[in-house]
Image (cartoon, rainbow, N blue to C red):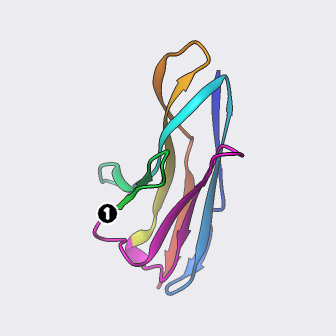
Amino acid sequence: QVRLMESGGGLVQAGGSLRLSCAVSGSIFRINVMGWYRQAPGKQRELVARISSGGSTSYADSVKGRFTISRDNAKNMVYLHMNSLKPEDTSIYYCNVNLLTVAREGMDYWGKGTLVTVSS
């Protein structure tokens, strides 16, 4: 089994910063892409940022220049550093990973989400 545990959400004022963390554990052979998605009330889930196993990154236009995704391959962790937060960043943020299990099965896994609330 594979487990994803997010942390770091909370309430912050506009202009502030937060760092989200996601720990991946379980029967992992190799983690490929790691990413963060978000879903605001009444809206579809959207990609925020993702990072390949080699460190290549991509971002949603709405967060470019403000958010930075990083990963620690030794610890099976992925982070999202969020700066200059805006009220429209308020969402539940979900960690997502694509990995190979020890049984060599390729799977996508999701965390349960962490709430980020940005007050104006």
The residue positioned 65% from the left and 32% from the top of the image is: 3
Q: Position of residue 70 (x, y in %)?
A: 55, 60
State which quarter of the image contains the N terminus: top right
Amino acid at pointer 1: Ala
Q: Position of residue 84 (x, y in %)?
A: 48, 83
**Front-most of 41 and 7?**
7
Bin the neighbour count of mark 1 within 10 Å (Cα to Cα): few under 14, some 14-19, many 20 and up: few
Q: Position of residue 20 (x, y in %)?
A: 60, 61
The residue positioned 61% from the left and 25% from the top of the image is: 29
The answer to if 67 sits in the magenta stretch is yes
Q: Is residue 55 left or right of residue 62?
A: right
**Front-most of 43 and 80?**
80
Q: Is residue 115 above or below residue 75?
A: below
The residue positioned 57% from the left and 41% from the top of the image is: 112
Residue 21 in view here: yes
The residue positioned 44% from the left and 47% from the top of the image is: 52
The answer to if 66 sits in the magenta stretch is yes
What is the residue that sits farthest to the top in this orientation?
103
Q: Is residue 56 left or right of residue 3?
A: left
* Residue under pointer 1: 60
Q: Position of residue 72 (x, y in %)?
A: 64, 52
**Front-most of 31 and 89?**
31
The number of numbered discs placed on residues in the rendered structure image is: 1
The part of the chain drawn in magenta is 61-88
Q: Secondary structure at mark 1?
A: loop
What is the residue that sits farthest to the front in this orientation?
54
